[in-house]
Image: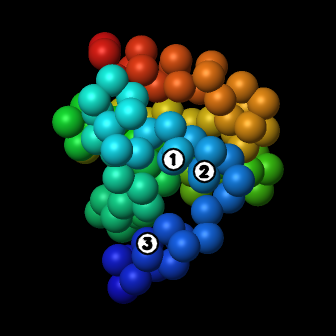
Amino acid sequence: MRSSRARELRKSPTEAEARLWWRLRQKHLDGFRFRRQQPIGPYIVDFFCSAARLIIEVDGGQHAESEKDDTRTNWLEARGYRVLRFWNNDVLSNTEGALITILKALRA
């Protein structure tokens, strides 16, 4: 069920997700491999680097002060994942800045 939902999400990314994916795909970011719309436990995360156990979430305004997002982040972090969140408008207006932040987290 989650894998079919993940496939649907991969077919209709937001503009911010598509822009970030273009820069993360095919090991473009320092050789790290990312997957997009990856099921992890009961959740589907936007981008996932298994080598670094790093999750990248790109959120729209509907996620502002979301308790569900806090619960989700806590669940993932309790299992040893690191979660970075970016707002859609931040990715669109400063893609390079987002990539620098991601790269720093990958190298940490």
Q: Which residue is identified by label 1?
A: 21
Q: Which residue is identified by label 2?
A: 17
Q: Residue at x 50, y 37 (%)?
A: 23
Would you say residue 23 is visible in this rendering? yes
Residue 87 figure quarter: top right
In front of the other: label 3 or label 1? Answer: 1
Disc 1 and disc 2 in contact, CB within 8 angstroms: yes
Q: Residue at x 42, y 20 (%)?
A: 103
* Amino acid type at image mark 3: Ala
Crowding around mark 2 (Cα neighbors within 10 Å: few <14, some 14 to 19, many 20+) is many
| Vertical arrangement, residue 9 with respect to residue 88, above or below | below
How far apart, in angstroms, are the residues tagged by discs 1 and 2? 6 Å
Of the 4 image quadrants, the one containing the C terminus is top left
Crowding around mark 3 (Cα neighbors within 10 Å: few <14, some 14 to 19, many 20+) is some
Residue 5, horizontal then vertical, whole percent: 46, 79
* Amino acid type at image mark 2: Glu
* Amino acid type at image mark 1: Trp
Crowding around mark 1 (Cα neighbors within 10 Å: few <14, some 14 to 19, many 20+) is some
Residue 98, horizontal then vertical, whole percent: 59, 26
Q: Secondary structure at mark 1?
A: helix
Q: Toward the viewer: 108 or 21?
A: 21
Residue 107 figure quarter: top left
Q: Which residue is identified by label 3?
A: 6
Q: Toward the viewer: 78 or 60?
A: 60
Q: Secondary structure at mark 3?
A: helix
Q: Earlier in the sequence, mark 3 or mark 1?
A: 3
| Vertical arrangement, residue 18 with respect to residue 86, above or below | below
Q: Residue at x 32, y 37 (%)?
A: 27
Residue 91, horizontal then vertical, whole percent: 68, 35
In front of the other: label 2 or label 3? Answer: 2
